[in-house]
Amino acid sequence: MRARLVGINHVALEVGDIDQALEFYGTLFQITLRGRGPSMAFIDMGDQFIALSKGRTQPPDGQRHFGLVVDDREAVRRTLMERGIEVAPEGSVDFNDPWGNHIQVVDYRDIQFAKTPAALRAVGAEHLTKRPAARREMAAKGLLDD
C-alpha cells in the first residue's frame, strides 16, 4: 500500500538574506512569523507555512515554481507593478523574487483548494466564497459539503 498525498505542510525557499526576504514578502503579503533563527524564518499561512532559508546559490528558476493562494490576486499584481517587478498586466500573476524563486499567485475564490472555516479565520479570510467555476470543479470531485 502506498501513502496518499493529503496536502502541503510547507514550502522552503532559499534566499540570499533573511531580513531582505522578510521585507520583500512583507510588502506583497500580510505576514506573520511562526519562528525565526539566524539563517531561517518561517512565515505562517494558517495551517501551513513558508520556510525561508539563507543561502541560495542556484540560478533563477524558469518553469519550476510553486503557487501561493491569496484572498486578492489583483492586489499582489498592483504591488508588483508599483515595485517595478515584471508581471503581466492581466491574467496569470507570476513573478520571480529577488533571489530567482518563481512564484505564481492564485485567488482562493477561483480554485478547488479549500480551507476549513477555522483555517480561514486564522488568516482573516473567512469572508471568501468560491466563485461558480471553482464550485463546479469542486462538486465534480465531491469536494463540496453543501
Image (cartoon, grey):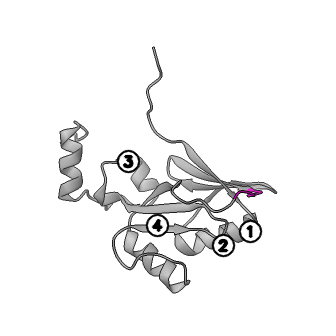
Residue 73 is situated, as x and y percent measured from the top left of the image, at 39, 69
Of circles 2 and 3, which is in front? 2
Depth check, mark 4 against mark 2: the one in front is: 4
Q: Amino acid at mark 4?
A: Asp
> Measuring 52% from the left and 61% from the top, which residue is drawn there?
103
Magenta-drawn segment: 54-58
Q: Is residue 34 left or right of residue 80?
A: right
Cα separation between marks 1 and 4: 23 Å
Label 3, residues with CA under 10 Å away: few <14, some 14-19, many ≥20: some
Q: Give the labeled residue for mark 1.
A: 19
Mark 1 in CB contact with mark 4 (< 8 angstroms): no
Is residue 80 inside the magenta stretch?
A: no
> At numbered mark 1, what does the secondary structure look like: helix, strand or loop?
helix
Q: Residues within 10 Å of mark 4 (few under 14, many from 20)?
A: some
Q: Residue beneath label 4, please?
A: 94
Marks 2 and 3: CB-CB under 8 Å? no
Identified by mark 3, the residue type is: Lys
Mark 2 surroundings: few (<14), some (14-19) or many (≥20) residues within 10 A:
few
Query: Which badge, 2 or 3, comes first in the chain's sequence?
Result: 2
What numbered label is drawn on residue 23? 2
| Image quarter (top left, top right, bottom left or bottom right) of the C terminus | top left
Whole-percent x and y of residue 63?
51, 57
As rendered, which of 24 and 100 lies closer to the eye?
Answer: 100
